[in-house]
Amino acid sequence: MTSKKYHLTKTKVANVREDIENRNGYIGGSDIGTIMGVNQWKSPYTLWAEKTGLIEVEDISDKDAVWFGVMEEDIIAKRFTMKTELKVKKSNYAYGCKEYPYLRGHVDRIAAKGKWGLEIKTTSSWNKTKYDEGEIPESHYWQCMFYMFLTGWDTWYLATKRDNRFYITKISRDDEAIERMLDACEDFWNHVQSGEPVEIDGSDSTQETLEQMYPEEHQGETVNLDSQEETLIALLELATHEKNMKELKTKYQNEIKAVLGEAEKGETGQFIVSWKANAKGTRVFRLVEKSL
């Protein structure tokens, strides 16, 4: 356990699902991966825009993957018990901390006997995580660490159903990681309360958020961009670099095409190149690396 003393809280909630949905007023477990910068689907900037009310939180409850994930929770929990002989139960509590009142956790399952919890995940084959080798997605790791902090417990299990495969991973508490997580949460929440944006990144998530925030332009309005002079210079240099790289790429492709001639494909010990017609009759160039 950490040497720091925290006053943890546990509040009974009438409807856990409704409490989870009203999440703009706090940081929840599913937000932690984003705050730690390991969520490939949502950027910290998007999460900041949601928490500050600049954009609406997308309702994903009716999406197939989410719906089936919720429906299969009981089945996965039962399979976990069958595999481990460890019994679990639902928790009708929200977990928090007086020192960090903006942190609030809702856990999937807790031990029927003992002090540990269970996080349940449903995923598919697009997820290439090597669970057999003890690997887990970073966002799931941080979520479990978040729950270990708020409960004060030292162990969390991750039960993952990937298509028709089932994996169980035991995660131990890491107080140094928790302190880094708390610092990141505090910094993020300060941005939420002040309204000052977090750092903007180059993700699709941030791009989509900005387009949602500013769907229309005000005709005739001009903004002074002197403060962005260096960024504009860098952008222009990147555009020039992109153009040069595109030309170089085309040059290299043309060199290979000239050697291929009328051949459909060519290969080396490492690569396979094809140049064949698509449905429209246009020859398309493709380069792939051979599998080891």
Image: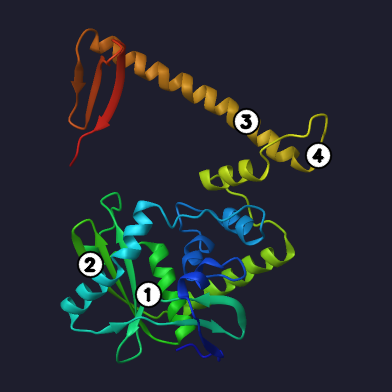
> Residue 121, position in %: x, y?
32, 65
Quarter of the picture containing the N terminus is bottom left
**At which x and y percent is residue 112?**
30, 88
Query: Given contact means CB atoms under 8 Å apart, are the residues at marks 4 and 3 in contact?
Result: no
| Separation of marks 4 and 1 at Cα, in angstroms | 50 Å
Q: Which residue is mark 4?
A: 226
Q: Nearer the viewer, mark 2 or mark 4?
A: 2
Residue pictured at 56% horizontal, 67% vertical: 23
State the separation of the CA atoms marked 2 and 3: 47 Å
CB-based contact (under 8 Å), mark 1 and mark 3 = no
Q: Earlier in the sequence, mark 2 or mark 3?
A: 2
Circle 2 SS class: strand
Q: Earlier in the sequence, mark 2 or mark 4?
A: 2
User: Which residue is found at the position 27% from the left and 15% from the top?
Assistant: 279
Is 144 in front, or is 289?
A: 144
The answer to the question of whether label 2 and label 3 lie on touching residues, with beta carbons closer than 8 A, is: no
- Rounded to the nearest angstrom, the CA distance separating label 1 from label 3 is 49 Å
Quarter of the rendering containing residue 25: bottom right
Q: Mark number for residue 108?
A: 1
Q: Amino acid at mark 4?
A: Asp
N-term-proximal mark, 1 vs 2 = 1
Label 3: state its secondary structure.
helix
Q: Find the distance from the CA under tag 1 to the CA under tag 2.
A: 16 Å
